[in-house]
Image: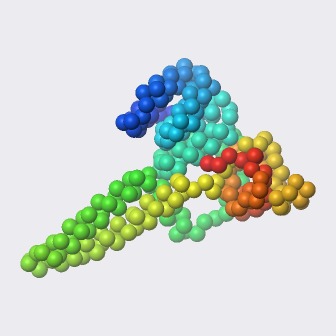
Amino acid sequence: MKDLRTIGLFLILFIQAPAGFASAGQLTIAKANKAYADGSYSIAAELYLKVAEEGYASPGLYYNLGNAFFKVNDYARAILWYERAKRLDPGNEDIDYNLNVANTKISDKIEPLPELFYKRWFTSMIRLFPVDAWARICTWLFIAGLAGLVVYLVSRVLILRKAGFWGAIILFFLSLFTFLFAWSGYRDTASTSEAIIFTPTITVKSSPDESSTDLFVLHEGTKVRLLDNIGSWYEIRIANGSVGWLPKTSLEKI
């Protein structure tokens, strides 16, 4: 537990709270913060969860939920909420750190398939900033590019026209890249193609049928990717590339 990082419980929630957020929700958060500070982690988790179920989404709220569940040794739920926090704030080192700590507490230690270098680079760029930050950067770069284009069109000074032209080209090019980062980050955030196993031990099947062949065993807290669904079953893939089928009731989407 001592490795767990906690960050400004009061600040991270109240600073990010939208202006229209109900005072009742803020009061619940305040109660949850106090319960956490007092060591009543189960009560804190219940209160944070109540706010989340009312539709309030924040990396700070999700992070605190992960911390509260970690403190009561509910590692599957801790991982679930850290993963949700990471989707909203992918570059947050505290979220990454606590998620890694939580993953050391579960049974399955799965070696992921190696990624191609350009995929690793693209993923690392997406995670530098939250989606809204990439969107703002894209907007400002595009506006700056338009300004450069205006300088090129209206200026009668040759050096200014050249600077405006090449500046606009570079800025438009950069805005295209940042748009790709923003769009990819948004797609990952909106996607529900990943899930956490919430059954202590479960056998992955070769097809969506209880009588089908047993392939391998997974445990609570393991993250899987959802590939397909048939009836009450999901086709899943784990980090090492192995594929199989699991009942929907054994998973919770991130």
| 210 sits left or right of 134 in the view | right
- Would residue 244 be visible to someone looking at this image? yes
Q: Which residue: 66% across, 44% down?
A: 103
Q: Residue at the spot x=50%, y=51% of the render?
A: 90
| Residue toward you, 226 or 240 | 226
**Residue 47 picture quarter:** top right
Q: x and y percent of residue 5 in the render?
A: 53, 35
Q: In this view, does 168 lie to the left or right of 88?
A: left
Residue 10 visible from this viewpoint: no
| 23 and 65: which is toward the camera | 23
Q: State which quarter of the image contains the N terminus.
A: top right
Residue 44 % position (x, y): 57, 26
Relative to 70, residue 146 above or below: below
Q: Which residue lies furthest to the top in this view?
A: 38
* Place of residue 94 in the rendered image (x, y in percent of width and height, measured from the top left): 50, 42
Total marks drawn?
0
Outermost residue to the right: 211
Q: On screen, 140 above or below 158? A: above
Q: In this view, does 1 lie above or below 159?
A: above
Q: Residue at x 63, y 57 (%)?
A: 193
Q: Position of residue 245 (x, y in %)?
A: 79, 57
Question: Which residue of the protein is positioned furthest toward the bottom in this rendering?
Answer: 158
Residue found 69% across the figure and 54% down from its top: 224
Figure colour scheme: rainbow
87 sits to left or right of 113 = left
